[in-house]
Amino acid sequence: MRFIRDPLFIFIVVGILLFAIDSARQQESTDRNIVVSKNDIQRLHDQWLSQMGTAPTPTELDGLIDSYIREEMFVREARKLGLERDDVIIRRRLAQKLQFVVEDRALLEPPGDLDLRGYFDRHQERYEVAERLTFSHVFFSPERRDDANKDATKLLGSIHDGNWRELGDSFMLRRTYTQATPTEIRRDFGSRFMTSLSSLPVGTWRGPIVSGYGQHLVKLTQRNPARESSFDEAIDRVRNDFNLERRNEVNEAELSAMRENYRIRIER
């Protein structure tokens, strides 16, 4: 144990202690400094402008700076108390922010036309232009009539383009649909109506056909069958899908790389 009395050993120990104390003081001093830089102020200004549509007044900007300082103080005091530990919301928020950083890196270089055209060619079935139907209808309400089907059938022989708007009962939705997709028609009338409508010939009044509301006489005036879209038609959707797929690929690659740095044990 002689080395404990050795002056060199004592000097080294004292030096380490002084260094630790000085580092702690510097850290405490740093924690007590709150600097609101020009970049911070510009960021606060730009956030207000983006949300409100107008630049903040000097008074409003002072209020934003005060709020920023108050938030910074609260965050630092919360960290001193260890409030960020074992907090599910904070954990999820940190994980989400890291994911955003990873995704932003994936989009640093926007895709070129060749990339997008290649993606479009590989997934062209996604960008099919849906069938479009144009039709008019006359509604017969089962709540207002003793036999809506019978009334609709009786009027079918006398309905024509000159009088159809005067017939039937009032309807809460449109009476004429132009270039409607099957999805839109199912949403408004139901699948049974759409199935019946798709089999009608173009140009004549037919029916009655049933919807979720009641009975209808229908005239299909135009049918545009489904078709493949051109690249120019689908470019916005292609770009969004391409970027989404690239984000997912980068996320998976980053996650795999992260897992290599950890030894994971699951205790059940």
Image (tube, rainbow, N blue to C red):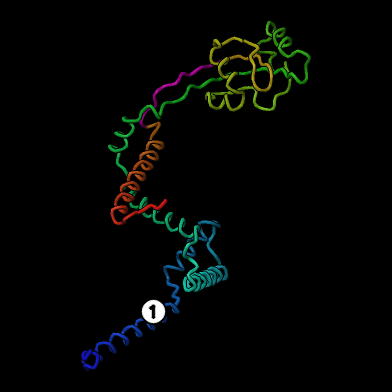
Q: Position of residue 238 (x, y in %)?
A: 38, 36
Horizontal arrangement in the rendering, residue 90 relative to residue 185 (left or right): left
Is the residue 96 above or below the residue 56 in the image?
Answer: above
On-image quarter of the N terminus: bottom left
Horizontal arrangement in the rendering, residue 21 relative to residue 173 (left or right): left
Query: Given the current orientation, which residue lies at the most extreme top position?
Result: 157
Residue at the spot 66% in from the left edge and 10% down from the top edge: 160
Q: Nearer the viewer, residue 38 or 86?
A: 86
Q: Position of residue 253 (x, y in %)?
A: 30, 47
Is the residue 93 above or below the residue 29 in the image?
Answer: above
Which residue is under mark 1? Answer: 27
Residue at the spot 62% in from the left edge and 18% down from the top edge: 136
Horizontal arrangement in the rendering, residue 108 relative to residue 29 (left or right): left
Query: Magenta stretch?
Result: 221-231
Q: Nearer the viewer, residue 157 or 29?
A: 29
Residue at the spot 45% in from the left edge and 64% down from the top edge: 43
Q: Position of residue 47 (x, y in %)?
A: 49, 60
Q: Nearer the viewer, residue 11 or 224?
A: 11
Q: Nearer the viewer, residue 102 or 228?
A: 102
Instruction: Please rate how many residues cluster around mark 1, counting C-alpha atoms within 10 Å: few if below 14, some from 14 to 19, many from 20.
Output: few
Residue at the spot 33% in from the left edge and 50% down from the top edge: 255
Amino acid carrying mark 1 in the image: Gln
Q: Position of residue 130 (x, y in %)?
A: 46, 24
The quadrant in which residue 33 appears is: bottom left
Please tell me whether residue 224 belongs to the stretch shown in magenta.
Answer: yes
